[in-house]
Amino acid sequence: VQLVQSGGGLVQPGGSLKLSCTASRSIFDTFVVTWFRQAPGKPRELVASITAGGTKRYADSVKGRFTISRDNSKNAAYLQMNSLNPEDTAAYYCSGREPDALGGQDYWGQGTQVTVSS
């Protein structure tokens, strides 16, 4: 399964961006999808996750600002990011984990840079 990311870029503080993660196979709808980010010199951080059933989880730092969603008909997951601030600047990665019954393998997108700056 290949995951292809799109979106990202440069945005001013207070702005919004939407990241997309599209899978090459429909089995993606069984995956737990997680968005991670990593800023230079900092450890990787879990941003948000969504289960196959739609249960969502967010890092405290993004609650109320970011929204994770998925559209299984399009083999896609999204991260809507609002009220962005410079601390959100990082490389963002989507990850899909297949169910343990199918092997439990993790798949990764190629990453996309988000820069929040005036």
Image: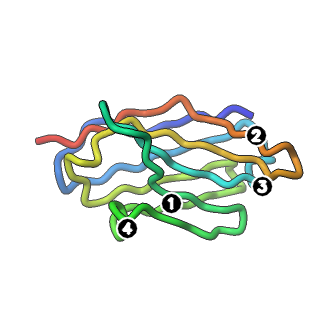
**Residue 14, image x, y percentages:** 19, 56
For mark 3, give the secondary structure: helix
**View extreme (right): residue:** 101
> Which amino acid is tagged 4?
Lys
Compare residues 41 and 17 and report the one nearer the observer.
Answer: 41
Q: Position of residue 6 (x, y in %)?
A: 48, 37
| Residue carrying label 1 | 68
Q: Is residue 27 above or below residue 66?
A: above
- Can you say whether 9 is above or below 77 in the image? above
Give the mark, 2 or 1, whose residue is nearer the N terminus: 1
Which amino acid, by three-letter code, is at mark 3?
Thr
Cα–Cα gap, marks 3 and 1:
16 Å
Circle 4 Cα neighbour tier, 10 Å, few/some/many (<14 / 14–19 / ≥20): few
Residue topped by disc 4: 63
Report if the CB atoms under discs 4 and 2 are less than 8 Å apart: no
In what element is the residue under mark 2? loop
Q: Is residue 20 left or right of residue 26?
A: left
Q: Residue at x 49, y 57 (%)?
A: 48
Residue that carries the numbered disc 3 in the rendered image: 30
Q: Secondary structure at mark 1?
A: strand
Q: Sequence-wise, which precedes: disc 4 or disc 2?
A: 4
Residue at x 39%, y 35% (from the top left corner): 91
- Front disc: 2 or 3: 2
How many C-alpha atoms fall within 10 Å of the one at disc 2: few (<14), some, or many (≥20)? few
- Mark before the other along the chain sequence, 3 or 1: 3
Which numbered disc flags the more N-terminal residue, 2 or 3?
Answer: 3
- Of mark 3 and mark 4, the one earlier in the sequence is 3
Tell me the CA gap for discs 4 and 2: 28 Å
Task: Please report the residue visible at 62 percent of the width from the left and 52 percent of the height from the top.
Answer: 33
For mark 4, give the secondary structure: loop
Q: CA distance from mark 2 to mark 3?
A: 12 Å
Q: Quadrant location of the C terminus?
A: top left
